[in-house]
């Protein structure tokens, strides 16, 4: 795994809306430093970085980064209790014809 991805993953899930502007800016800078496309291994690791909300749009950027990987990360329905971003990744793969709905 490239160091830029490892740094982002090591810092854990994105913060919620209550985080400081400095913290959100720091995570955006980390995300922007990750070269595209990501590998399959990196995409799978990045899935763990979604937080409880959209983090002022940063979660959408993370979603698009994950989708630069070589294949869908989530190939089975994550279930009704899953994070909204995990559901969105799965639904986008289904709707894009990449995987069948399970």
Image (cartoon, grey):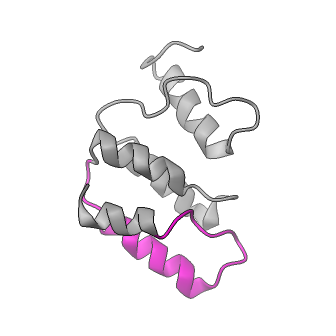
Tell me which residue sits at (29%, 34%) in the image.
70
Tell me which residue sits at (51%, 12%) in the image.
100
Residue 71 screen position, x and y as percent: 34, 30
Quarter of the image with the C terminus in it: top right
Residue 9 screen position, x and y as percent: 43, 62
Can you tell which quarter of the image residue 8 is in? bottom left
Taking the magenta stretch, the answer to whether it contains residue 94 is: no
Can you tell which quarter of the image residue 50 is in? bottom right
Tell which of 41 and 62 is nearer to you.
41
Tell me which residue sits at (58%, 28%) in the image.
91
Quarter of the image with the N terminus in it: bottom left
Instruction: Report the side of 48 relative to 37 (left or right).
Output: right
| Total marks placed | 0
Taking the magenta stretch, the answer to whether it contains residue 13 is: yes
Residue 79 screen position, x and y as percent: 70, 29
Instruction: Report the side of 100 relative to 44 (left or right).
Output: right
Instruction: Report the side of 6 relative to 58 (left or right).
Output: left
Q: Which residues are magenta?
A: 11-37
């Amino acid at each position: 795994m490239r160091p830029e991805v490892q740094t982002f993953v090591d810092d854990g899930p994105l913060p919620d809306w209550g985080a400081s502007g400095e913290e959100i800016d720091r995570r955006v800078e980390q995300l922007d430093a990750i070269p595209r496309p990501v590998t399959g291994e990196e995409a799978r690791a990045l899935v763990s970085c979604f937080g409880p909300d959209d983090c002022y749009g940063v979660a959408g950027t993370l979603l698009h980064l994950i989708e630069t990987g070589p294949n869908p990360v989530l190939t089975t329905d994550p279930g009704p209790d899953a994070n909204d971003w995990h559901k969105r990744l799965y639904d986008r793969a289904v709707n894009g014809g990449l995987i069948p709905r399970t």
